Amino acid sequence: MKNPLLPIAIALAAGIFFADRVPLTWGWAIPYAGMALLLLVLMLKLAGKKMQKAFMPFALAAFICMGYGLQQNASPLPSSLPNDEHLYELRIRRSPSASTYSWKAEAEVIRMKDSSGWRDWSQHDRVMLRFPKEAMPPQRGDHIVAYCRLKEPSQALNPYQFDYSRFLQRKGIVREGRINDLTDSADIASGKRPYSIISSSEDGLQERMIEVIHRSDLSPSQQGIAEALLLGYDDDVSTETRNLFRNAGIMHLLCVSGLHVGIVAAILGGLFFFLGANPRRRIIKGALQLAGVWGFVWLTGMAPSSLRAGIMFSFLIVGRMVSSRPPTLNIIVASALFLLLIRPGLLFDVSFQLSYSGVLGIVLFYKPMEGMLRIPSSLKKKWTIPLGWMMEKMWSLVCISTVAQVCTLPFTLYYFHQFPPYFLLANITIIPFAGLLLASVMMMVVLYWWPAAFMAVGKMVGVELTLVDGLTRWVSALPHALIEDICFPWPMALLAMVILVVWALAIYSDRRPAWVWLSAMLPLCLAAGAILLNFSHKGQNYWIIYSTPRVTAMEHFEGLQSRLFLAASPEELRPEEIDYYRKNLVVNNGIRHSRLSYCDTTSHLYAMGDGTLLLLDRSNISLFDNILRQEKASTLPARVTYLLMSETPWLTPLELRHAIDYDTLLIASNNSLRYRIMWHTQCEQNAIPYVDLAEEGAKTVRKCR
């Protein structure tokens, strides 16, 4: 087999995926079964040729078991931390990152103070802390003492909502909390921070380089781009710049990734071209490239994305050191295997999936696509005007950009629901400047000690950034520069990945005609699936009551349109604030147009499915009081199907039964926990059907047919 590591990597990934989706109580035995199978595999390998036919099936089964065991051991155990507020000593594990309203930092629990005093927390549970945006957050390695309530992360309670709890669990984080005030600022050991390779980069070199960039003549927007490009520090990148790069389809330029590490490796390879292809000189050249790549990774603070890219390119560089024509596909797969064996949870990391799908696509499809167009030899011979050379490089760039975009398309459509149709324009015009721009920013920082050279290079960087900004604005201003809200569910994403695999088999397999026919039929199946999905969206008609913490939100989906109802006024809530809970559902339902209604009235009566729903909150509770006191004639219906309690009204479910007849009680998530528990007990004692949206998630009401 030419690429034996590929099926092994697929088997390992399958085991990791199975362990994440179907955790078993007796799963501890699966890794031991994998070890036994691995020993059997080695015995079969050493046996005669007749027995070696069973080598690959047993090897794949062994790596499936190994993947399951690795993921199960990597998953954090349930924490025994108390749910109420306590005084904690915590150590910051990673430097804080800025979010919309706060700072976020990963920490571990060192000790906790309870009624018996301080006690060490041997489990060292990892937690996610939030600090106020206006506060100065602690840094990596700091020890802080603060009162905090560490609670379990919120789970996804609405359809297609981002599951933050699972996201943190895959990172080994078991609790989250917010810290508003530190108990004793003296316990922030900023001066006693332990030394590490990462802290030496973040606390020393990165800060000095950011200071150097700020002292240049670049505008604030250009300074933010330079910091993001060189260091991966994007806190100074403006929202406008982010939107421009996102619309142009080159957002990956603003975060250090495989592109930046690959540019550094290519620049170093070009600088040491004079070493040639001699085996000894290849080793020297590779060692210099490795040093430069890992120096750049260290410069970025060894962020997870740059660390993965550094490992990938290290495998490639070592492969070129060993052989002049290394097996590139096997090397890429080997680097992925290495990363998954260390951290199996990386399989679910979006950047990991995008990086390896793009690189594997370039390895598999770049050469066949490049061979589709041959530059005439007559153009190549015109050395006075290198037209042929320019056309060749341009076509090469088109091939790389197209292949990378197509191979990452299933993931971008599934996760982000968007597609930049002018990605070729952006990649042809802007990406070629990325290497020159990165080298120029490095040169500007290195020449800081020489004022004249620093100013000259700074002006050159400013011109380059101005050109990049102009090109980005031009591409993002084109009509339909970014197609958003694309419905692409996981079955279609899986089929798209299968199509890519079949295309690769059609190119490289010996049975080419069969794979060619299949590769032509599967895209038709994908198109048919998209048409059927559109027809199903046109026939949908149902209501959903969301589980939201602040206000009650309901939405009616009918065909390709929807209407959102918010039990609030425009001053109290903007619709963007609940997009976190509903946006993915709207996209996956194929909604083309959505209307908004603020239902801040006293009626709150809705025809829903085959019944009716009455919303009870602080604005109309007086109607129920009047009925119970028999002061006024009732303006409410005698009976409703659903009664939705919101904003913690002071009437109990049993009292409401005397005011109005209802079939099912719905308890909104914005009611207080104490009242919800009391209502649960009363409903169970009086046989009142109820649904607590804070526990059971959003309620869907469909019309009976």
Image: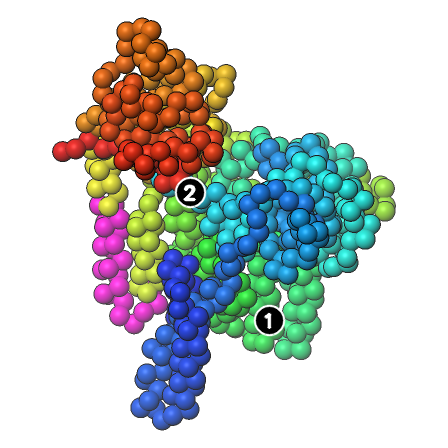
What amino acid is found at the position of numbered circle 2 in the picture?
Answer: Ala
Q: Is residue 510 magenta?
A: yes
In this rendering, the label closer to the viewer, 1 or 2: 2
Which secondary structure is most common in the magenta stretch? helix
Q: Quadrant of residue 319?
A: bottom right
Q: Is residue 286 magenta?
A: no
Q: What residue span does the magenta drawing correspond to? A: 507-528
What is the residue that sits farthest to the top in this orientation?
632
Q: Residue at x 56, y 35 (%)?
A: 242
Secondary element type, mark 2: loop
Secondary element type, mark 1: helix
What amino acid is found at the position of numbered circle 1 in the picture?
Answer: Val
Which quadrant, please, contains the C terminus? top left
Please name whichever residue, 482 or 134, is drawn nearer the observer in this view of the structure: 134
Q: Which residue is mark 1?
A: 318
Q: Residue at x 22, y 54 (%)?
A: 521
| Whether residue 335 is visible | no
Q: Earlier in the sequence, mark 1 or mark 2?
A: 2
| Whether residue 354 is visible | yes
Horizontally, residue 679 falls left or right of residue 80, namely left
Q: Quadrant of residue 420?
A: top left
Which quadrant, please, contains the N terminus? bottom left
Q: Quadrant of residue 459?
A: top right
Q: Which residue is mark 2?
A: 156
Please name whichever residue, 91 or 281, is drawn nearer the observer in this view of the structure: 91
Label annotation for residue 702: none
Q: Residue at x 46, y 50 (%)?
A: 166
Residue 641 screen position, x and y as percent: 24, 26
